[in-house]
Amino acid sequence: MKLPFIGIFSLLAFGCCWITTDAAPQQRASSCGYDSCTPSKPGVINVHVVPHTHDDVGWLKTVDQYYYGSKTGYQRAGVQYIIDSVIKELVKDPARRFIYVEMAFFSQWWQEQTEEKKAVVKQLVEEGRLEFINGGWCMNDEAGTHYNDIIDQMTWGLRFLNDTFGECGRPKIGWQIDPFGHSREQASIFASMGFDGVFFGRIDWVDRTQRKAKKEMEMIWHTSNSPGEPNSIFTGIFYEHYSAPNGFCFDVVCRDEPFIDSPRSADYNVVKKVKDLEAHIKAKALSYSTSNIMLTMGDDFNYMSADMNFKNMDKMIRYTNELASGVNLFYSTPSCYVKAINDEAGSRPWPTKTDDFFPYSNDPHAYWTGYFTSRPAYKGTVRKANTFLQSCKQLHSLAGPSAGGQNLIDSLRRSMGEAQHHDAVAGTEKEHVSQDYRLRLHDSLVDCQKDVGNSFSQLLPIGSQALPPQEFCLHLNVSQCAITESSSRFVATVYNPRSHQVTTYVRLPVMNGVYTVLDPDGSELIVQLVPLVNLRSIETERPKSSATHELIFQAASIPALGHKTFYILKSSARHGQQHSTTITSRERQSTTKLTVNFDANGLIESVVVDGVTVMMSQNLMWYAGMNEGNANSIFDDRPSGAYVFRPNGTDATPISTQATLIVQTGALVSEVYQQFSDWASQVVRVYKGQSDVEIEWTVGPIPVGDGIGKEIVSRVTTQIPSGGRYYTDSNGRQTLLRRRDFRPTWTLDVTEPVSGNYYPINSHIYVTDSEQNAGAVVALVNDRSQGGTSLKDGQIELMVHRRLLYDDHFGVGEPLNEPGDGPGLVVRGTHYLLVNPSLAGNHPVSLIRPLAQQMFMRPWMSFSATSLSFTNWKNNFRTEKSGLRAPLPDNVHILTLEPWRDGTHLLRLEHVYDIGEHSTLSEPVTLILDDLLADYTITSAVETTLGANQWASESSRLPWTTANHQQPLKKVSSKTRQSSSGKTSVTLLPMEIRTFIIQMTPK
């Protein structure tokens, strides 16, 4: 938020110091926001004409190609010209309005403007004529995004708006008009950001039809199990698409007739166009419950020649108001529309919704569920990049002012913001655009690596000795790291970005030899050397690697928001703590807690947990993607593509019914390498002391020489009688019940029995045999966004890779056929398999959440070659340090700790359990903020909304009444109090995130 002087304001203060008066947001101007709205008229249909452009942050062209307007062969689109043109037209008439969404583009345009032009734009914003909607860096996807990423990309866009325009730049409405399905967690985030509503267009075609008939196109969406107004949001669905009505697109890229209003012209068409529009308006109004409707006037990259648009819209408004009956047209914005219907409805109850809008289909055979998995390598990179971004920001804050500026972090903030776009992480962009996304993200990761190196240079040295340069290995997943392969003496620093101690197993690619690993105390650790197998399948991904083995050791009790350093020495003599790996044919892997049994065909046949056997199977399988040319109807002919998953059949085929095994056992880990084919394999691992099974799958290049596209799944089958129920996460946070062949709020006609039951999985999917927490559960926890389902009782599957030969005709214009480094993309990823034969009163999610947190926020490593002995290293550098005074309670997570502005920092505290998920951890929890950090005292703080662009005390949302709450929804607030000792406590309710801007002083 903007930080000028606003006089006296409320904040939380501890100790002797307060946040300075320049930390407050700009005062609100009197003419923006709801004060700028045109009043509705009684007794008529009030038509809110909303000019807008939808500017994809990459799709058919790269981000830069879209901004500059190059590569017109792909698409005629140039964002800089759109904004230039719109500003010129808004200045001409104070009645005109325009909304803008994507800050990735607008911020770039803003930096190029003169001070005179900036002053003009600021005036337009202050008068409510140019309004920012959504306000994120992009319009993010809702299926392939993690809630951490959504919040970050929204925050970065909102910060730009607040820095630039103050309170008048604060969006009040979510505008998710193009993402392909809508999640409950996304709506919850908008509600927590103080938004008064959200609008979108893409819902299932049957759902839309039924809602039109029932006048339920607008509703109150309850987005959480917790009661109260903060978790609900007004939700509006467009009548059709987000474009202008047929015949009324006046953009330079359209072919509709303009208003020809000269009576002398033989082409005079005013009367006809008014009648056509009047008919459209009155038909549309039948599906909405107030006298207000919205007329969206725009589409993808419209308004490059905005004079054409506005000149004709001026005529459209003028002539329709003059000639039509019972309608009143005027320029407006989505926020003014919401205010108008809120004023009109009063205490009239609105319908409600509690589930989500997945999966999305727009015809009987077009379920947009393929993109849940499309471009799996990029999806995995985005997830890893988030972990590094959080680590980078945390370390910068913990390093203090000496860490320097934020420009290196900003680079990754921007690239991660771009990556959340609904054609980026979704995997629905052209191949050359995907390559550009990867390049931009890689370059930004390198920038943030430099920032981490700078932070470590401040945090680790004890005396005057400079910390050696830190090196990072981005390809550890394919067993490649130059420094660990070539150095005989090096140090590995393991950083834990979580708020609790973490114990993990480290795997480093090395040459065969004898290794000693010392922990921070100098104790020699047990290590295990595991030979690398099947390098051929990933050799194109690791061309510079010479590693033959992986060195494994346990990194125990890594401090919360802290690090441990491990000293690694390659020697010529064998020491007592290095354990060899035995290669056997034994078809059983076990630890004291867990045993995995394999059958004679080399497939998993059972898992034994604490002596109880659960019969099950697991295999890699494939669906044949539907090709073109199968029927005369376009619906029946729909192929599988980047967006759509449409299998040619109702069941998947095993890649092989037999697997060749290589079994490796040792002191720390036992693992079974399963080879299904020359393009599909996996490693099943059981680590000492772990209660889950790790399955590392490697798939690709998927063969398509037979002319058949293939979609690969990992399927687990058990005998659990799950009754058609299965459970999936919502953007990695909430957990939702799914029912096979069923929708909670409308009647489903099953036309695609496989893809119609697929849902986006960002964290976990599970089945259980009881709703009373007494039976068995089987779950998969994943490391990236994937599609998943349960097609039969006791069964769950996740789609891991897809390669297709046909475009599905939804705009991308090319098949999803990633080349990788030539013959096709090879992807490697990880699932955690959790099996529990008896919940014994525990909620399944209470077992899953710790694993999901472990998967999502895995420790990050950096390396330094050194000539120092261990003793000299320990005498010069901190080998163990926590950023927290003490680990936080198990139900609390520091979602955000990052440098903000003017010496302040942004802190988000999160309750990670929902109501009823745990007997004790689902209760509210209270923290003392003052002494949260080890080396700093939090001397002052002010709570903000989730987007960090408005003080929480000043946030006021429009009230709504619902059918099951006859009074306007009331806020159920959590607590922030100052104790008798002068320290401040913060209470978190289940699933609550609270955001603070804090000041820290060194202890």
Image: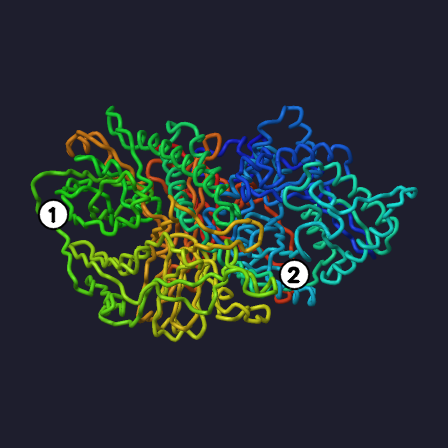
Badge number at residue 895:
none
Residue 668, given in percent of the width and then of the height, sits at 18, 54
Visible residue check, residue 1001: yes
Residue 187, given in percent of the width and then of the height, sits at 55, 54
Which part of the image, by quadrant, shows the N terminus? Answer: top right
Visible residue check, residue 690: no
Residue 400 appears in which quarter of the rendering?
A: top left
Q: Is residue 180 left or right of residue 876?
A: right
Q: Nearer the viewer, residue 122 or 930?
A: 122
Residue 31, given in percent of the width and then of the height, sits at 71, 38
Residue at point 33% right, 64% down? 619
The answer to whether the residues at label 2 and label 1 have Cβ atoms under 8 Å apart is no
Which residue is denoted by mark 1 in the rendering?
577
Q: Nearer the viewer, mark 2 or mark 1?
A: 1
Q: Is residue 736 above or below residue 794?
A: above
Q: Is residue 839 left or right of residue 247?
A: left
Secondary structure of residue under mark 1: loop
Residue at point 25% right, 52% down? 534
Q: Nearer the viewer, residue 633 or 245?
A: 633
Which residue is denoted by mark 2 in the rendering?
961
Give the crowd class for mark 2: few <14, some 14-19, many >=20 residues within 10 Å. Answer: many
Q: Earlier in the sequence, mark 2 or mark 1?
A: 1
**Residue that extends furthest to the right in the rendered view of this protein:** 264
**Residue that extends furthest to the front in the rendered view of this protein:** 706
Q: Mark 1 is on which residue type?
A: Gln
Residue 921, given in percent of the width and then of the height, sits at 38, 59
Q: Is residue 696 left or right of residue 648?
A: left
Which part of the image, by quadrant, shows the C terminus? Answer: top left
Q: Nearer the viewer, residue 292 or 478?
A: 478
- 3D distance between C-alphas at marks 2 and 1: 67 Å
Residue at point 17% right, 30% down? 868
